[in-house]
Image: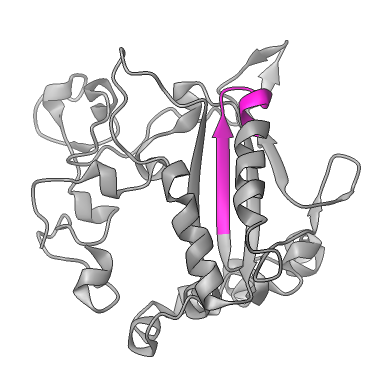
Amino acid sequence: MKTSFTDLDDIQGNIVKAYGRFGYPTARYIFFQFHDMDAGRGFIRSLLPLITTSRRWFDNTPRPPATTNIAFSYQGLKHLGLPTMTLHSFPEEFSMGMKARGEILGDDGPSSPKHWDAVWENDKRIHMFMSINARDDKALEERYNKVQELLSIYPDQVEQLRGHRGTLGADMPYQEAAAVKIDGAISAQEHFGYRDGISDPYFKGSGSNPIHLIGGGKPTRRDPATAAGWEPLETGEFILGYRDESHELPIAPVPRLFVL
């Protein structure tokens, strides 16, 4: 059981870092399907040197030109050979997937799954998600090409899925993303017109700048306009294996080592 110490090297960077705040305005999102368990595992192992962790970036620490993070769907974990007992211990919402829960989530009308990008037509094919965030287009392309190089080792066993809409409606192998620019300058405004990044959750052991504690943690009875009026949230509210605000370990998949 983890309590006070948070191993930032064991947590992916996009869990803690809002990359836009650190100067990564451009991104690329990619989906993969595993046709072979061993090949899928091998591809993931080859990606490990590229994965960006939550280790704190200090002012005098060189930052990578690009970041890389991955996530898995229920079907992805199943195709990677996780034990049946572990798979059955996940929440139903996760095992069902987003498309199957479309009506529950209110995805109807123009937001109905039938209007989603073609890559979602058979969402059971989506096994792994990858995000690449970069400081500029050159760094983005270099990191993407490195991933392609690793992918080429498994030409028939691991597939990069197409079906993303490009700017011209093309059948793209990835989805492009970027910060919104206003008058040529990068803005904090996001694509729905709201100002983004006003506050992010601040939890124990995150290593985030204490200035973000105000409005990001939990209020105390002291001065709410200063850091003295705020305390960090418990780590377990965001990361499995740690205690939450109830000072309990949240329900998690089994065995316990799976989330430690």
Residue 42 vs residue 230: left or right?
right
Point out the stretch of residues depicted in magenta. Answer: 129-140
At a point 15% along the width and 65% down the height, the residue shown is 249
Of residues 177 and 153, the one nearer the viewer is 153
Q: Percent x, y for residue 136?
A: 63, 22
Instruction: Choose top left, top right, bottom left or bottom right for residue 233.
Output: top left
The tally of labels here is: 0
Instruction: Choose top left, top right, bottom left or bottom right for residue 200.
Output: top left
At a point 62% along the width and 77% down the height, the residue shown is 100
Residue 249 vs residue 88: left or right?
left
How is the rendered protein coloured? one colour
Residue 155 vs residue 118: left or right?
left
At a point 17% along the width and 45% down the height, the residue shown is 6
Q: Percent x, y for residue 10?
A: 28, 49
At a point 32% along the width and 25% down the height, the residue shown is 57
Q: Would residue 131 be counted in the magenta stretch?
A: yes
Q: Would residue 107 be counted in the magenta stretch?
A: no
Q: Percent x, y for residue 111?
A: 73, 60
Answer above or below: position of 99 versus 173.
below
Answer above or below: position of 255 versus 60.
below
Answer above or below: position of 97 versus 133.
below
Of residues 40 and 129, the one nearer the viewer is 40
Residue 50 vs residue 5: left or right?
right
* Residue 227 appears in the figure: yes
Answer above or below: position of 208 versus 107.
above
Q: Percent x, y for residue 216?
A: 29, 34
Q: Quadrant of the C terminus?
A: bottom left
Q: Quadrant of the N terminus?
A: bottom left
The furthest residue to the bottom: 84
* Residue 223 appears in the figure: no
